[in-house]
Image: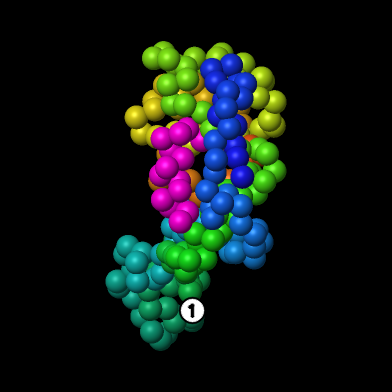
Amino acid sequence: MTAPVLDAVGKAARQLELEAGVFDVDVKRHLVHEAVRAEQAAARAGTRAAKSRGMVAGGSAKPWRQKGTGRARQGTIRAPQWTGGGVAFPPGQRNFKLKVNRKARKAALRAALSSHAVGGTLAVVEGSVFGEVPSTRAAAAFLAEWGQRVPLVVVADDEEAVLAKSFRNLPRVLVLDPSTVEVGALVWARSLLVSEAALARVLERAR
């Protein structure tokens, strides 16, 4: 299994041999689904909440005496039936995180990478391909010459700021650090572009 190494204009300069154990494995769809579902669940804030009668301010005194008024007995104006009172059985904060075993998570990542490698939508690029000055115009011309469809995920190392800045303003292009690459992003992307430095770190996470 190989992937093209693209030059500054988006043409294949050479072929890079890919690790078969990461980029040429069977795609197990149920593991990919499980990983994406867990990633989306972990991204949920779960911060919805409402105040119960014990959390609402005021209402410590009985609004009127128990008997003799002709009205229904009331103990506090912060009960749920009062305007401004607390909520009965209020929703609280919730953790939506789902557990995925480490081996299953790595297998899902390998499956997503293999899908791009087998489909021919994976390419490698040098981090210094655009020189020392970021250029969105050069990145757009690079993608046009490459000929792959967007959405595109670009994986660049921390020290490859020029490469990241060149691509990050393009529409439907997501620039990620190797440590933040998730299965959901790879499934969303129609094509994948990885720098040579970032490729080594992606391999470490997928092995």
Q: Is residue 163 visible?
A: yes
Residue at horizontal 37%, vertical 74%? 76
Q: Is residue 8 left or right of residue 47?
A: right
Q: Is residue 52 left or right of residue 153?
A: left
List x then y, in percent, for residue 23: 57, 49
Report if residue 138 lies within the magenta region: no
Residue at the spot x=47%, y=17% of the render?
A: 130
Q: What residue sits 54% from the left and 17% below the top?
A: 8
Amino acid carrying label 1: it is: Arg
Compared to 77, does 37 lie above or below? Answer: above
- Front residue (pair 90, 28): 28
Q: Residues within 10 Å of mark 1 (few under 14, many from 20)?
A: few
The image quarter in which residue 109 lies = bottom right
In the picture shown, does residue 149 fall above or below 36? above
Number of numbered markers: 1
Most frequent secondary structure within the magenta stretch: helix
The residue positioned farthest toward the bottom in the image shown:
67
Q: Position of residue 21 (x, y in %)?
A: 54, 55
Q: Which residue is mark 1?
A: 71
Which x, y percent locates residue 70?
49, 81
Left or right: 190 as drawn, with respect to 168: right
**Going by the image, does 53 lie left or right of 28?**
left
Asked if residue 181 is positioned above or below residue 58 in the image, the reply reads above
Q: Quadrant of the N terminus?
A: top right
Query: What span is colored magenta in the figure?
Result: 193-207
Task: Give SS at disc 1.
Answer: loop
The reply to whether residue 63 is visible in this rendering is: no
Residue occupying the point 39% across, 25% down: 161
